[in-house]
Amino acid sequence: MRTPTKRLFLSVSALAATTLGCGVWSSPSDYSAYRAYRYEAAGPERLAAGGRYLTQHPDGRFAGEVRGVVLAQEEDFWADHRSSVDGLNEYLRAFPVGTHHDEARERLRVFEQARAQQEAERRVVAEAERVRRETELREASARQRLWMRTQFNRWVRLFGGLNGWGQGMGPIVQGNPDFGAAFENDPPQCRAAHCRKNYSLDFYIPVPGRSAVPRRIGFTLDMVRVGTDRLVNQTMLLVHNRGLTAWWELENQQIADAESAEARETAVRWTMDQLRAATAASFPEAHDTPAELYGPPPEAVMQGVEDDESAEPTPVDPNACVIPSQPLGTRWSAVVGCEGITTPRLTAPQDATEAHARSLTSDEPAVTPHACLRFDAYAAIDGEGMSTDEGLTVTLIPPCAIHPPAPVAPVRPGRGGRPARPARPAAH
């Protein structure tokens, strides 16, 4: 009795004999590779199977048959697949020992060389783009850190060189094109006694091991107008909510402990030095303010107190020689454009002067003042209900305070009530 294994072997043998049309036997490996070729679907996969058969059995029992079919399709296959990397790889897979084998390998080498060059060029472009983006980010970050310094420096220079102090807003804007362009861009909010422009900046301070801490700093430019003619004799560059501390945090990228008086004082001293450096650089002839130009004692300003804009303006006596008082909490004061001042020149610490110079994108010429002005840098005073605004004020000093009128000598009557004759000059 025949076993199933013997029956299967005889059936396969019979199939091979029928396929070959003769009784010649082939090796199991030869027949297996040929069978894979015959049972593969038409197309590239069958050609690939035929190519594998010819590679493994170049002199196999079925080599002639397979070679005839494969080679008959090679030229058309080559024409369709020689123009791309995928096509060339497909050709070599279908015809591993084909007529165009060497040419296909050379074409692949050229394609790979071009691809490598393109990849190198792409990496160069990508690296240049990465460097550009990083540079832009660094520059944007630097601009943001210097935002408060830039605001103060810009407006101190514009106001310090302003023509028309003591006049109304119209003549001032018309007589100062640079100031007019800066001030009228994004027009200010003007009420009875003030013309204001508000700016703000949101920023973050990185903290190792935790999320960055958000901060906001607010800056206000406030031109004060007085009297019925709304004359400008003072402007204030303000940061709110003890913003000098926020300025220190922004530029130094560190957090100042809000509960620490020492941290607060460190921030205030630092910002005061920066303001001194910017002012001294723009006005080399600035002097420390002499005591006679301090004005009357400053008055405390309470938090949230605003002038009544609906009230009638207080008339200003043009003949009065009134020096506006300094802000409460003034840390340093300087005058520019004032004749006859003998106090020491305004100076700043070396590190602040160098920091100011580094912050400039180009050389800035000295500013020529056209009036006697007093610059007062001040910090908010601690106390319940006290205003938390602080910064820098620029105040017009009236000419009469610099050149008081000469006293008039009394006239002695002569005989008969007539004025006495002037004395003759002494003979030489």
Image (cartoon, helix red, strand yellow):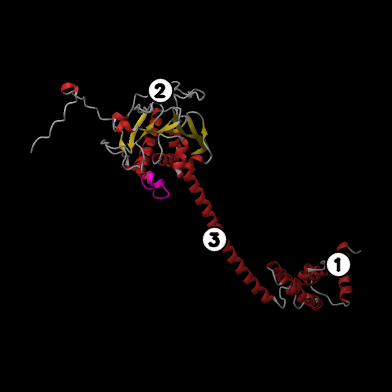
Q: Amino acid at mark 2?
A: Ala
Position of residue 176 measured from the top left corner of the image (x, y, whole percent): 44, 42
The segment highlighted magenta reads 356-367
* Pointer 2 or 3: first along the chain: 3
Q: Verify CB contact (< 8 Å) between mark 1 and mark 3.
A: no
Height in image: 147 above or below 39?
Answer: above
Residues at circles 1 and 2 in contact by the CB criterion of under 8 Å? no
Residue identifier under label 2: 300
Q: Quadrant of residue 343?
A: top left
Residue type at the position of mark 3: Val
Decide whether the magenta segment is chiefly helix, strand or loop: loop
Q: Nearer the viewer, residue 318 or 137?
A: 318
Please give the residue where the numbered disc 1 appears in the rendered image.
9
Disc 1 residue type?
A: Phe
Query: Secondary structure under badge 1?
Result: helix
For image coordinates 57% across by 63% down, the residue present is: 121
**Mark closest to the chain's N terminus, 1 or 3:** 1
